[in-house]
Image (cartoon, grey):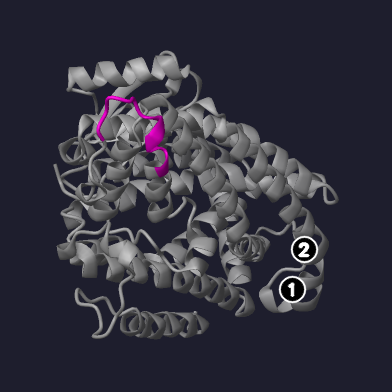
Amino acid sequence: MKKLIIPIVVLVVAFVFSSMLLNISKTLPEGTVIPLEVREIIDADKLDNTINYSNFNYGWYFFNNIFGFIIVGTILMLGVSGKIRDRAKNMAEKITAMPNAPLIVGSGAAFIAMLLAFLSATPDHPVSGGTLGIALAWGVVGMFVGKSSRFALTTLYILLFTLLMDVLNFPFAYYKGFVVEHYFELSNETLSKWLADFLKSNTIGYLFSVLLIPLAYWGIRKSPKFWWAWISAGFVPIIVCLLVISPVYLAPLFDKYEELKDETLKSRLTSMAEEAGISGSRVFQVDKSDETSKISAFVTGLFGSKRIVLWDTMLDKLEHDEIAFVMGHEMGHYVLNHVWKFIGFFTGVLLALLFIISRTIGLVIRKFGHKMGFVELSDIASLPLLMLMLSLMMFLLSPVLNGYSRMNEHDADVFGLDLTHNGNIAASAFAKLANENLSNPSPPAFIEFWLFSHPTLKDRIDFCKEYAPVMEENEIPEPATQTTQKQ
């Protein structure tokens, strides 16, 4: 355990230095030149905040990824993963040797899950059917832990390793997710609500980890040569299932969903959905104003669970015409099959990356395995190495994934414009998005290339304005300078 002092000290030092390096201020350094195209979109009273907040997020992305690689690499090279595996093995042997172990462990896991559910419950988000389902799933996991020593070893390792990573990452999650958002006055969420959501998300995340990771290692053991293909193929039904159940059972655990109260807008959006070919969609509003001042909307779910969702902050800050365009954009993703296309594209990328890993990870294990505490890929202690290699390659491929996403987002913009026929209204919606979310509309080219999954707001606004000639002839476009004004 003494070796753990090293990564902990590194973590604290890096945290202090990152706070100094990524110094967040509400005033730009003297002499900072703001491009004219940014000044034309962002309100003067929000200009400094927007640039500082955006720059902080850019720096944080790279820092968080690189530092994460360092932490996992340190855990591997110090042999911590092997020690966690040994501890999990001892615990698994003791647990499975108990009389009536499946019943005891299963009921205990369900009880702990329910206890965490009650601790994280709030008046707006009480214990619900989804919560009970999660507790039941934990109970089933616990029963198998008590029955199978191998599954117990794998599950306990995953829980111990994930807990270690969460403890190390907690200061960063709190700093970025709570402190920074409040500093820029984008969040009014209470600490208790933030902690409750953090606890719930981890409870769900741990559950999916102990359900899916053992399946992956089962594939590695059963098919040492072709595990990469089986895991990639298994990704498709898993992500489809998540897209189906998430809007109905998981999302309501964090936010309060209600049928859209504005009947006029609801009728307009459902009519647009029918016109777009999305039949049977329901329109919901989410109470987010008690957490954030940001605006957002999306179309989610698959098959019978598909729904149109708007944050109440958007309902308060955007006009009906602007909301109609935003939702037209989101509907475009459905009609143009972007969800299915992205699943196919990402599955292909995952297949290629796992194939590369399958051909190289053996070399790493042979060279450093004894130091890391494992000598075979099928050993669950190899999980951090597998995660490190995959996440590093995904990080390097970020420009490719984001470039593909930007193309889809542009196509959805075109769809929304074709559906609503008003380029100036769409430009106004994007300008408000930049102002309310403190988004730099014209970031540096490298940042756009590496980080942006959407076209820049400046490019989107320009495109929308160019679309203006297809508006109805009797419609008089508003001056561009008015698009940034709050209605």
Q: Viewed as shown, does residue 172 lie left or right of 221?
A: left
Q: Find residue 38 and report its horizontal and vertical position in percent.
A: 31, 63
Q: First in sequence: mark 2 or mark 1?
A: 1
Q: CA distance from mark 2 to mark 1?
A: 8 Å
Circles 2 and 1 in contact, beta carbons < 8 Å? yes
Q: Find residue 225 and report its horizontal and vertical position in percent.
A: 85, 50
Q: Main secondary structure of the magenta part?
A: loop
Callout 2: SS: loop
Asked if residue 468 lies in the magenta stretch, the reply is: yes
Compared to residue 274, the image places residue 283 above or below, namely: below
Which is more toward the observer, 441 or 13?
Answer: 441
**Quarter assignment of residue 259:** top left
Q: Quadrant of the C terminus?
A: top left
Q: Is residue 289 visible?
A: yes
**Quarter assignment of residue 72:** bottom right
Amino acid carrying label 1: it is: Gly
Any mark on residue 180, and which? none
Q: Find residue 421 and report its horizontal and vertical position in percent.
A: 37, 28
Q: Find residue 219 and report its horizontal and vertical position in percent.
A: 74, 44
Q: Residue at x 49, y 62 (%)?
A: 448
Q: Residue at x 59, y 35 (%)?
A: 238
Q: Name the residue carrying label 2.
A: 376
Amino acid carrying label 2: it is: Glu
Callout 1: SS: helix
Q: Viewed as shown, does residue 223 lie left or right of 385?
A: right
Magenta region: 466-476
Q: Residue at x 19, y 59 (%)?
A: 43
Q: Residues within 10 Å of mark 1 (few under 14, many from 20)?
A: many
Q: Residue at x 27, y 85 (%)?
A: 31
Q: Name the residue carrying label 1.
A: 369
Furthest toward the front, the residue is 473
